[in-house]
Image: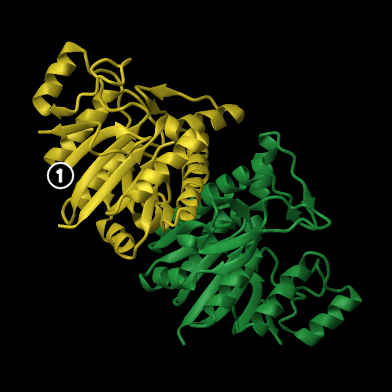
Chain colours: A green, B yellow
Amino acid sequence: MEKLIIVKVGGAILEDQATLNDFLDHFNAIPDLKILVHGGGRSATHLSKQLGIETKMVDGRRITDAETIRVVTMVYGGLINKNTVAVLQSKGCNAIGLTGVDMNLISSVKRPVEEIDYGLVGDIESVNTFAFNLLLQSGTIPVIAPITHDTKGQLLNTNADTIASSIAVSMSETYDVSLVYCFEKAGVLSDPDDDASVISDLSFKMYQTYKQSGMIHSGMIPKLDNSFKSLEMGVRQVIITNAGTLSTSKGTHLSL
Amino acid sequence: MEKLIIVKVGGAILEDQATLNDFLDHFNAIPDLKILVHGGGRSATHLSKQLGIETKMVDGRRITDAETIRVVTMVYGGLINKNTVAVLQSKGCNAIGLTGVDMNLISSVKRPVEEIDYGLVGDIESVNTFAFNLLLQSGTIPVIAPITHDTKGQLLNTNADTIASSIAVSMSETYDVSLVYCFEKAGVLSDPDDDASVISDLSFKMYQTYKQSGMIHSGMIPKLDNSFKSLEMGVRQVIITNAGTLSTSKGTHLSL
């Protein structure tokens, strides 16, 4: 099967033009078919603040009201997406910036209201592998902003990690897929304050132990739960690594 | 040659959800290959105001500083583009929302500073007909926001009418192209206050007369100059019509 690399980048990387530039150099150098998925939460929070819109987060997830979906559509789908594509194009990478609504790439359902009403937040229902295939095989590099739609005209704010893993799982039917999460740390750390403490190989069993002992906690847990689930569902490898080097030989390699 | 319809919509149409919906119903009903180009200046002015950024216009053109290019990238490339695509997708139209930077669809050069420094404004240099062809022939409907790039990483604000006519001219090499400008009026009017005074056929010669007499003036002049130039450069027909009906049999038909 042909190789396909799905790279997720978020957090601090997107906000600093020099760091973003280095990251995109590494991304551009990947010789295989590839898809980039980006976040942008901090910039959305910043714009919301400028506009006097209160940001409400529950467990790291943004409560998305009618005003907030406008903000994230502007920031994720416009500002960050198009600037990333502009930099990639300047490097000779034939990037195309898209959201889940374009070509109906990713459809979702508005998250049902249970204890918390997340508002206009989407839980992914379907990834249009036919459309992704068409884009990849025509030589373009999709750059995906974390916005999906309900197919009835409503845009929905959707977690970028989940978008990356959903694309990875769906594309595993036809490709040998590697999913690479990039962030400012060197990988999953046994000591959060020591970048040299990278756990280079993390099995599901070890993960359970680390989780129970509290050594792995908070924000890493949904990311890792998601990652192990992707491996179970056919993704060949999941790597959590530093965005500055985008080195798939370093970082944390997950295994079942 | 296969037919291709390029529709430009702007102004008041984009701001009212009901009007936009009617317009997009008509657009969706066009049986031929098609491309939609949209503006969004009023929404950009509104967001600028909310952010405390002063809007400076010269002859209807926006002076685009570093802050303003961020605003238009968010509003044109994000908010308006993705909402338009969401509505089209809900109607079963396989729309894809793009700017000139995506797939390097439209490259431009920063307008040289002469009497006025327009800032980050692009004059179109090249339309990537290969990429437009690929999109059209794969069954997608491109929805284009008026942002281009200089191929060196800089996004540039670019007039939507000019984008529509540049695409139309370039695509005329391989398609039988009709260029349709849609707005809130019924067409080019001999009396601006009377929607029944539509000039149904406007030759270049008549246009010169009307222009000299002052009957056609201000904002219509660059649009019409542009349109007649498009006809000279191979576009088969140019129609200026009402967005509510998007009727190509009504409105003003231009001829050389």
Residue at 27%, 24% in the rendered image: B220
Residue at 65%, 42% in the rendered image: A66
Residue at 74%, 76% in the rendered image: A198
Is label 1 in a helix, a strand or a loop? loop
When the figure is inspected, residue B228 is found, relative to residue A187, above or below; the finding is above
- Quarter of the figure with residue B9: top left
Which residue lies most toward the right here? A213
Q: With B60 as the anchor, is A232 left or right in this view?
A: right
When the figure is inspected, residue A89 is found, relative to residue A129, above or below; the finding is above
Which residue lies most toward the top here? B213
For badge 1, the amino acid type reads: Arg
Residue that numbered label 1 is attached to: B236
When the figure is inspected, residue B207 is found, relative to residue B239, above or below; the finding is above
In the rendered image, residue A67, in percent from the top left (x then y), is placed at 65, 40
When the figure is inspected, residue B121 is found, relative to residue A235, above or below; the finding is above
In the rendered image, residue A85, in percent from the top left (x then y), is placed at 46, 56
Q: With A170 as the anchor, is A161 left or right in this view?
A: right
Other-residue count near label 1 (Cα within 10 Å), few / some / many at <14 / 14–19 / ≥20: some
How many numbered discs sit on the rendered protein?
1
- Can residue B199 be spotted in the picture? yes
Q: Quadrant of the C terminus of chain A?
A: bottom right
In the rendered image, residue B224, in percent from the top left (x then y), is placed at 22, 29
Instruction: Decide which of A184, B205 is in the foreground and name it.
Output: B205
Instruction: Decide which of B5, B228 is in the foreground and name it.
Output: B5
- Can residue B110 be spotted in the picture? no
In the rendered image, residue B122, in percent from the top left (x then y), is placed at 34, 39
Task: Report in which chain the residue with disc 1 lies.
Answer: B
